[in-house]
Image: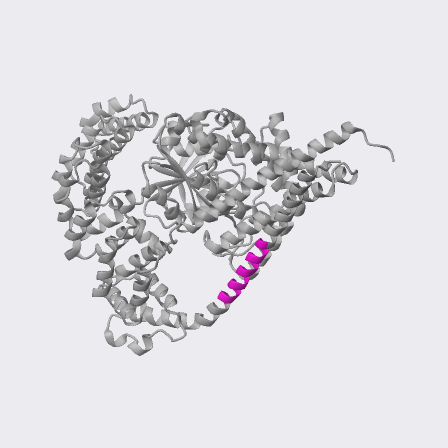
Amino acid sequence: MIPEPPFFDLVAQTVAILVIAVSMAQNLLYLVLLLTAIAVMAGRPQVHQSRALWNGVVDAAPPVSIIVPAYNEATTITDSLRSLLALEYPDFRVVVVNDGSTDTTLAVLIDAFGLEAAPIERPSPLEHAPLRGLYRSTRHANLVVLDKANSGKADALNAGLGQVTTELFCAVDADSLLEADGLLRVVQPFIEDPERVVAVGGTVRVANGCGVRAGRIRTVSLPTRLLPMLQTVEYLRAFMMARLAWGRIGCLMIVSGAFGLFRRDVVVDLGGYSTRTVGEDLELVIRLHRHLRDSRRDYRIEFVPEPVCWTQVPESLAVLARQRQRWQRGALESFFAHKDMLVRGRYGRVGRLGLGHILLLDVVTPIVEVIGYLLLPFFWMAGTINTEFFLAYLALTFAFGVFISVASLVLEEFERRRVPKAIDLVRLTVAAVIENFGYRQLANLWRIQGHWHYWRGAAHWGKQTRTGFAAA
Amino acid sequence: MLTPGSLDLVMRLIWQATLVLVAVGFVLVSGLVLHRLLEEWRDRRHRPARERLRRNLLSSLNAPAADERPTAAAMAPPDRLPIGETARLVDELAQIVRGDARQRLAAFASANGVERHWLKRLRSRLGPYRIEAARCLALLDTVESRAALEACLAAGDGRLRLAAAEALAHRPALANGLAARLFDDGAAEGRHAARFWHRLAAVAPAVLLGRLDAAAGRPQLLCRLVEALGDASHVAAAGRLEALVGREDETVDRAVVLALHRLNHPAVVRVARRLAAGVQPETRRTALSVLASQARAQDRDLVQSLAADPVADISAVAITVLSRLAAQAATGAQPA
């Protein structure tokens, strides 16, 4: 037998230890988040029924403007808007921003909601691409549509924000459906602590498979196809565990672009959404933290698990890959734009923990995990690392992921119970297992591609394909 | 080979601990699946009885004449239906019925064990259960429920005290006592207490008016009182509200101008003009939005000064108001 060169052994062992150490750090973080989420859920007051919530909140609920940026959303925009216009909330208006769609989005809107051109009355305090027109609905007094040249979601949100006069605004994706009492629930932290709360995020769930009629989710079902099913597990893990826990720790770094409520004056003072990143939702929240810490304000950014926004997730690998590459790029852009917060003492735990976890989970982990997939089986077969190391690697990379996903499911079932039937719980458990064998590795590969796009400086969103909502 | 004994032991512990965690996860999820199956079975079993009770209750509540309503025997919840199910149904209907129908629903709740169920919940050691029970008991006006809610006014949990106060607040006879009791309670100051003060203002606005002076130095509480009086359309309060401007911080001033706006009282223009020079941007913004809704030619200079405001969206709105005033002047139109 030819002895292996000691240098190769040393390199291989160092790589193995690095991979295991990073996986260990990642999994310990997940464990802490899981325990925190359990503690938060255990201490939360009972969730009110919608009607009781309405009777309780209606006197104190401040007016809210809902901004809906729309780019080529002709297939879903009508359902989404009907869902918004049917919201149970005492005083709200909807501002749709048609971001230069090249499909029939504007025509669909004009036809479906009886829009008529109206003058633009209010000069915007924010910079954005010029408005081409403003339309008011003849059927819904609280619906306004802005038409502007295409320049991205962040710019569209800024254009909408420029026409908003209410104290609070809610950013909602055009391909999402809000539950009727979603706004009532998400506004609660603003009612309870209006001086300190600046932003609140709600739960986003997968709408694929659900029955929709007149813009409302009528039947909640799990997706029938595997890819959306796997994403259902991912969304559960992200919202039921991670965001809930980060909210409690005071380091919530993202309020999902699909559904978030913000104080308008604070966001306008910051100059609105950044148009220099494709992760404008993440970047805005990091900038909010930075600004409010810089000005030494006592503030809260909250996550409330009850308000549910349903969204369509990609059903094809190609579209999902583009989405994940974009998310990864957005995370990197946001992290590197604010990386100094990581070490500066005045940002406290937001810098160390908030930015620190983005560094670990979004910057380092994808690269290290892919290195692990490629090299550790090879090192083990070559006899450079022993079986204990290899089993520990497999446990951390595959089995622990199963545990975290299953634990999120348990948390969801204990507290929210939105999984329709026992059989669906079984299906989700199966998905939570198989997600770790193939899908997770693929997702990491897309994240590496996102890294590549970031370092190469590519600037595109990628084509999104909408399939519309299924009829109930 | 990477085989120092201690490191190997750590690695072995990692994969063994992970496998244990995975096994625990599966056991838990299996238990939940079984629990869910049991619930689905119970739901199927109780559904016919629950739906029958719902139908009977609805037809009883919707029938204006007593002889059109189902008999008490027909209305009684089936024996097999757990009391929690009946209570949930009563609470659901309590959110939508008013007047005489509400009283009949309350009588049904008292006669069929729902009140007992809620009173038992009110004694639970779990805070959320107690708060929920206090909210539900607002439907009833029995001696027992009132005594139990009044006892909760001395509870250690501020949320429970507030929930009990809210449940009692629709009784005019109790308004004065409740206002006195909650007045010095920190739980009744924040926005979450708005509901309590609104309910009180709806039945006894004079009680709140009488407390305005005593609330001096407590801007949060003053805001709650001012908002409640504005929403209760208590026009007689306008003079007292106007007198508060400039006495406390600007949050109170803003609440006053908005309350006067809701009351549609002429004093609102006078107050808005004063607040247009506010220190906080939110105050100037509020004043401007009130002035903009009135759009009077004599406010042109004031709006002109706000057009130079350092806060971009205030100046932008002021410019729009100016252009509207200019258009009015050109056409000779008067504000609505």
Judging depth in this view, the residue of A131 and A410 nearest the camera is A410
Magenta highlight range: B24-40
Q: Residue at x 43, y 37 (%)?
A: A250
Judging depth in this view, the residue of B38 and A331 nearest the camera is B38
Q: Is residue B88 magenta?
A: no
Q: How is the image coloured?
A: one colour
The picture places residue B112, in percent across and down from the top left corner, at 31, 72
Rendered image quadrant of residue B137: bottom left
From what the image shows, is residue B12 above or below residue B54?
Answer: above
For the image shown, how many numbered marks are present on the structure? 0
Judging depth in this view, the residue of B298 and B25 nearest the camera is B25
Q: Is residue B27 magenta?
A: yes
| Farthest right residue in view | A1
From what the image shows, is residue A4 above or below residue B304?
Answer: below
Residue B306 visible somewhere in the drawing: yes
From what the image shows, is residue B28 above or below residue A141?
Answer: below
For residue B230, side relative to residue B118 (left or right): left
For residue B299, side relative to residue A40 (left or right): left
The picture places residue A88, in percent across and down from the top left corner, at 36, 50
Q: Quadrant of the N terminus of chain B?
A: top right
Q: Quadrant of the C terminus of chain B?
A: top left
Rendered image quadrant of residue A131: top left
Judging depth in this view, the residue of A193 and B292 nearest the camera is A193
Residue A416 visible somewhere in the drawing: no
Q: Main secondary structure of the magenta part?
A: helix
The picture places residue A415, in percent across and down from the top left corner, at 46, 54
The picture places residue A343, in percent across and down from the top left corner, at 49, 25
